[in-house]
Each structure stands twice: as C-alpha cells, then as structure tokens.
Amino acid sequence: MKFVEIDLLGVYVAPMSMLIIAAWFVTVGLRLVVSRLGLLTQVWHPALFMFAVYMIVLSCMTLIAAR
C-alpha cells in the first residue's frame, strides 16, 4: 500500500494522522479494559505505561497499513 494524502472535505490529510487518531481510540479502549481489571495500579508510572502502549499500537497499525 502506498501512503497517499486523503481528501477530507477539501482538506488534504496525511494518512499518518488518520492512523494516529485510530490508534488513540484503540488505546482508550485498552485503557478502559486495563483499568477495569485493576492492572493499571500494578505499573510504576501509569501515564508512561499508557504512552508506551499507544506507541506500540500505532507502530503495529502503521506496519499493517504499510503491508
């Protein structure tokens, strides 16, 4: 797949920005699940942990989209 700009109501948007938003929604869902299970209290720095999870999700989504 080639990354090309997306025309969104006359505004050209980079495909990476769409992946960033999608990864954010996935991370929010994962955060709800992890906090409901009480696992977020087991990590040393919850914000840093969730940022790392976000980076992992974004990287995986980018690799899948680039395939």
Image: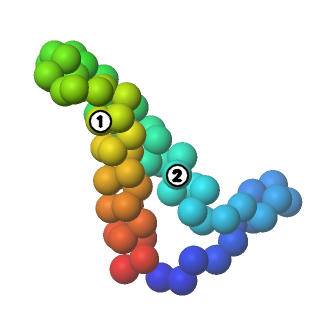
Provide the secondary structure element on which disc 1 rests.
helix
* Disc 2, SS: helix
Position of 39 compared to 47: left or right?
Answer: left
Residue 60 drawn above or below residue 2: above
Q: Residues within 10 Å of mark 2 (few under 14, many from 20)?
A: some
10 and 28: which is toward the camera: 28
Reply above or below: 15 against 55: below
Give the residue pinned by disc 1: 49
Q: The C terminus is located in which quarter?
A: bottom left
Residue 6 lies left or right of residue 64; in this view the side is right
Direction right: furthest residue: 10
Q: Is residue 22 above or below residue 25?
A: below
Residue at horizontal 29%, vertical 27%?
45
Q: Amino acid at mark 2?
A: Ile
**Residue 18: image location, x then y, percent:** 57, 55
Left or right of residue 39: residue 31: right
Residue position for label 2: 20
Q: Residues within 10 Å of mark 1 (few under 14, many from 20)?
A: few
Where, by quadrant of the figure, is residue 64 drawn?
bottom left
Name the residue type under label 1.
Phe
The residue lying at 57 percent from left, 63 percent from top is 16
**In the image, which is nearer the foreground, mark 1 or mark 2?**
1
Residue 25: x %, y % from top left? 44, 38
The reply to whether discs 1 and 2 touch (Cβ–Cβ < 8 Å) is no
Residue at image point 37% right, 28% down: 47
Q: Earlier in the sequence, mark 1 or mark 2?
A: 2
Tell me if I can see residue 45 in this picture: yes
Residue 8: percent from left, percent from top? 75, 57
CA gap between label 1 and label 2 equals 17 Å
In this view, which residue lies farthest toward the front? 44
